[in-house]
Amino acid sequence: MGEWVRAQVDAGRYRTVSEVMRDGVRLLQEAEHRRLLEKWLYEDLSPEEEALLPAEIKNRVKDHFTGLIDEARADVDAGRVVDGPKAMKRIEERLRSRFEREP
């Protein structure tokens, strides 16, 4: 690993070994945040885990999903939705028509 880190510096990708290490730690931190975020969305976090997931990340995710919900509600209010059985029937009809035309 040390050789690889030195090669990154020698290649000019980083100015110092410390910069390589900082980037590595940042990537590990991002991976841990993704893991915690996924666990938060699908299960829940322990108080210890909750403290490790920055509020900024949780707020961005909440805002994202709130936006999706708002868009869906606007689509429903504007009548731009089709219920599941009707949508599946249309898809089935299109597929049948396409297959019947093919030799």
Image (spheres, helix red, strand yellow):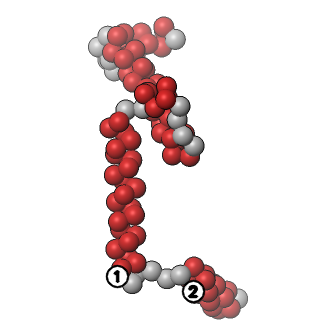
Tag 1 residue = 78
Image quarter (top left, top right, bottom left or bottom right) of the C terminus: bottom right
The amino acid marked with disc number 2 is Lys
In this orientation, which residue lies closer to the viewer: 86 or 96? 86
Tag 2 residue = 86
Q: Which residue appears at 36% of the width and 10% of the height?
A: 17
Image vertical order of residue 92 relative to residue 58, above or below:
below
Report which quarter residue 13 is drawn in: top left
Q: Is residue 63 left or right of residue 7?
A: left
In this orientation, which residue lies closer to the viewer: 5 or 75? 75
Q: Which residue appears at 39% of the width and 47% of the height?
A: 61
Question: What is the x, y in percent for residue 23?
Answer: 38, 21
Image vertical order of residue 66 relative to residue 51, above or below:
below
Task: Characterize the local packing of mark 2: few (<14), some (14-19) or many (20 or more) Cα atoms within 10 angstroms.
Answer: few
The amino acid marked with disc number 1 is Ala
Q: Which residue appears at 43% of the width and 20% of the height?
A: 24
In this orientation, which residue lies closer to the viewer: 98 or 35? 35
